[in-house]
Amino acid sequence: MTDPARFVTHAVENQAPPLAPYDLWATDRALREALAREGGGWAQGALAAYGPVAGGELMELGFAANENKPKLKLFDRYGHRLDEVEFHPAWHRIMQLNVAHAVHAFGWRNEGRPGAHVARAALSYMAGQAEAGNGCPLTMTYAAVPALRHAPELAREWLPRITSIEYDARSIPAAQKAGCTIGMGMTEKQGGSDVRANTTKASPLADGGYQLVGHKWFFSAPQCDAHLVLAYADGGITCFLLPRFRPDGSRNAVRIQRLKDKLGDWSNASSEVEFHGAWAQRVGDEGRGVATILEMVALTRLDCMIGSSALMRQAVAQAIHHATHRKAFGKLLAQQPLMQNVLADLALESEAAMTLMLRVARAVDASGRDAGEAAFARIATAIGKYWVCKRCPPLVNEAQECLGGAGYVEESILPRLYRQAPLNSIWEGSGNIQCLDVLRALSREPATREALFAELLAAKGAHAALDREIGALQSQLAAVADLERHSRTLVERLALALQASLLLRAGNDAIAGAFCESRLAGAHGYAFGTLGAGAPLTDLVERARPA
């Protein structure tokens, strides 16, 4: 008889155990501290309940949802037009769990209570770590509320459904559902971010609705129950609510041409559509479409910041977890000085991103009560959206490298994070759009400059590098000649100064000092892992370790 032991080639050892399932809330000290600072501490019960779900079942479902991409179903077996998208059951389960925990609506369901939108941002931050592909419909449903309030009758009809915590995936008229989701369709082939180049036409109907003829080049989440779209009416470019079904229960004339074949965001569907006399209802006045939908965009841009921060946090958690269990050259990777520098640098970048994101969420939360916070939200959203989203791809790539070849293999979550990483810098206005928006705010809205520098100067005297940078920024803004050409440099410096000010006031002097020395004082290279002597490497890694 052959001895089986003769063919045993090796024992599996020196491998990190799976990180999931784990509690995304209980293991994130920086998030818990920031939530309390920004006024959302009263919601910690809801966050504590969601943390194990996000790091457990949702994390597992994310793999299945990405392995089974949505499929376009244009017709049924008999030839009837469907224009539907078929999703794997994992997608619907992810949506069900997220809606049940009010990831899309916590701020509105607790409206009027300070910190409600901060808590909602923290929920979304955890959701994005588990699976980012569901973020699109969740975000747009959340962000549609201010726009819909420009049409009180529509708001009375739709807001109870879109703030519901019941998820209903059925393709039926919205009036028959307890919970609905909202999508968005702004851009067209010829325009992109320049929505005033759109050509879709809206003609009034006798029933008070409008008939839309045209197309959308990016029609996000076509499975949603309705979409906010832009089209030209007689009075100019106007915002409309376009439901999937007409009032009589028939399918609306929205023809899906194809689903986009995207770099990442595999579990979600993005589409190209044509409107063949589609029925829609006006939201806001004719000619005020851009202003109306920009209220939605202000929130979706915040969610871009949240989404990128989430990807960064999960990438750092995976890298630290791996390095904590993997040995090389006789000791754990996490004990190797150079790897410590890399992990600490990644952790510092991730915490700074999350800190800025939650501060902007507080400003958004307080905008209706405080004019100064509204002005700060106006400019800080664009600054943060630009910088945090730009920092995400290189950080995720560096985290992949911490795992070596394993970080390039689909069985780890890192390839999915890396594919997702560029999305938020493109979605809802690319980097140049954000920089131009910052310049526009600074030049036309003096209150935004006052609010911005009030935030920066709140940490005056806490670190010499920040004091010098604030002075330099004031001088640069005074020399307005050719500022547009250099606006990326300006917005980057503003973002770093804001992050430094926030970290200094957060109370951890060692971490804030490391950020100021590396990001403002020049004690840093172009790559991660180049923190200078004296940086609290061990503290940074331990603070970020998901354990």
Image (spheres, rainbow, N blue to C red):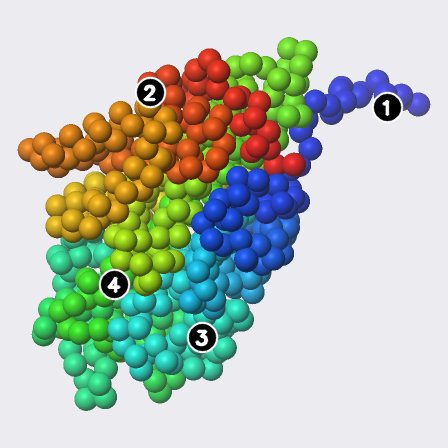
Among the two numbered marks 2 and 3 on one chain, the one whose residue lies closer to the N terminus: 3
Residue 344: x and y, percent? 51, 25
The residue that label 2 is drawn on is 521
Residue drawn at x 33%, y 62% as measured from the top left: 369
Q: Split into 4 quadrants, where in the image is the C terminus?
A: top right
Select label 4 or label 2 by which is in front: 2
Number of on-image labels: 4
Label 1 secondary element? helix
Among the two numbered marks 3 and 1 on one chain, the one whose residue lies closer to the N terminus: 1
Label 4 secondary element? helix
The residue that label 4 is drawn on is 293
- State the residue in front, 133 or 486: 486
**Residue 32 sits in which quadrant?**
top right
Label 2 secondary element? loop
Q: Which mark is residue 161?
A: 3
Q: Amino acid at mark 3?
A: Arg
Q: Split into 4 quadrants, where in the image is the N terminus?
A: top right
The residue that label 1 is drawn on is 4
Distance CA(mark 3)–CA(mark 1): 63 Å
Q: Amino acid at mark 1?
A: Pro
Specify whether 27 is left or right of 135.
right
Among the two numbered marks 1 and 2 on one chain, the one whose residue lies closer to the N terminus: 1
Select label 1 or label 2 by which is in front: 2
